[in-house]
Image: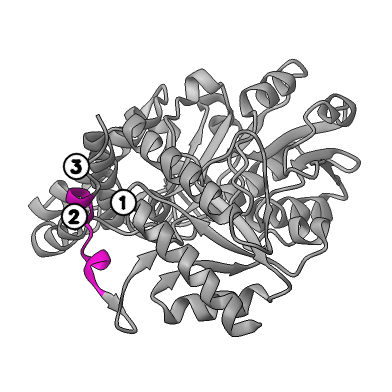
Amino acid sequence: MPLDVEKIRKDFPILQQQVYGKPLVYLDNAATTQKPQVVIDKIAECYRTINSNIHRGVHYLSERSSEAYENSRTAVQKFINAKFPFEIIFTRGTTEAINLVAFSFGEKFIREGDEIIISAMEHHSNIVPWQMVCERKNAKLRIIPMNEEGELIVDELDRLISNRTKIIAVTHISNSLGTINPIKEIISKAHSHKIPVLIDGAQSLQHTKIDVQELDCDFYAFSGHKIYGPAGVGVLYGKEEWLNHIPPYQGGGDMIHNVTFEKTVYNKLPFKFEAGTANYIDAIGLATAIEYIQNIGIYDIAMQEHQLMQYAATKLSSIDGLKFYGTAKNKAGVISFLLQDIHPYDTGMILDKLGIAVRTGNHCTQPVMDWYKIPGTVRASFAFYNTLQEIDVLCDGLQKVKEMMG
């Protein structure tokens, strides 16, 4: 049954406002999603009723807060079908999750001359941490290339993998091109050589069902604010065996079992990787966002977003002078484009005055823009609360951009 989008939109208070006297058309969902009222209410309720530092108190508030935090961990575990709750590590977001693996795995397993494989369409968050490891360890970064359509040339992976390859880190869905990468095939190729794989899931979990056991990935990272939850909280999933093998990323409270001036014994999983006061309130908010998504249905969400994508691609392609970047056969709800020779920043600024929020620039994928030899793109990205009428407004806005810029 199709989603009742008008009813759903009432769950998101920010969508009810006007911008510069125009109804807000929010098409920047790949940067961050808006929050339903139930998430906003849950965060406020926690601060009003159970706010207390977790795991450290025997009093009522601390016990209730700790219980809600650990229930949130279980909610995430079930949502992505991890084997154990302790395979879920709360972080500040995808970026910190990837940095955790890059630093900890790098310290333990990367040596001089070793190689790390990433793809040509990675977000800076899945490039820079691995470059830092390579600089520190005198290792080498190798790149899975892509074609003109923005699809990875996965066959090249067979050539890139060697006995020096220690880990492969790849995005599930490109934030700048919308390409859905064949991560199961990549994971299978890697595991045939006993190489672990990290998946950057920042752009995928909100669009499609994720089962980490079925994927058989070794690490999977995502952010709360991309999945209708609060900012400042995210998740690293890691297989138990890898999390036990790699050292902690940070030191401090809660990640210790015993401390003396001579030696520290680290805590068990998952606390070994959660140093200091956790962002427990936002972790609870993330669990509420997950429950909200489950109540709507991830498959129904995917169908709604697919309809939006098809409609947008057809409507935008009718605009004279518009060129798409990222035309893979298998795409999620992201469309990147340029309008004639108009700079993307100028396009975005004019659309903003019409109440239309899009993203402009390199989208933290500067190597992708360099590959296409362009300064950046205009990116419209969709969520299940968007409507076909909003896409019509975008297309009308782009016609006005053309008129104004000549």
Q: Which mark is residue 118?
A: none
Above or below, comparing residue 12 to residue 341 in the picture = above
| Circle 2 Cα neighbour tier, 10 Å, few/some/many (<14 / 14–19 / ≥20) | some
Q: What amino acid is labelled 3 in the image?
A: Glu
Above or below, comparing residue 279 to residue 360 in the picture = above
- Residue 288 appears left or right of 167: left
Question: Which residue: 24% across, 37% down?
Answer: 296
Label located before the other in sequence (2 or 1): 2
Viewport quadrant of the N terminus: top left
Q: Which residue is mark 1?
A: 385
**Does the rendering let one see residue 267?**
no
Q: What amino acid is labelled 2 in the image?
A: Asp
User: Which of the 4 quarters of the picture holds residue 36?
Assistant: bottom left
Residue 329 percent across, percent down from the top left: 64, 34
Q: Give the Cα separation between the discs numbered 1 and 3.
A: 32 Å
- Please, what secondary structure does the residue beneath circle 3 have? helix
Residue 237 percent across, percent down from the top left: 48, 36
Q: What amino acid is labelled 1 in the image?
A: Tyr
User: Which of the 4 quarters of the picture holds residue 76?
Assistant: top left
Per the rendered image, the range of residues in magenta is 6-17
Which of the two marks, 2 or 3, is nearer to us in this view? 2
- Residue 38 appears left or right of 369: left
- Residue 375 appears left or right of 392: right
Q: Tags 2 and 1 in contact by the CB under 8 Å rule?
A: yes
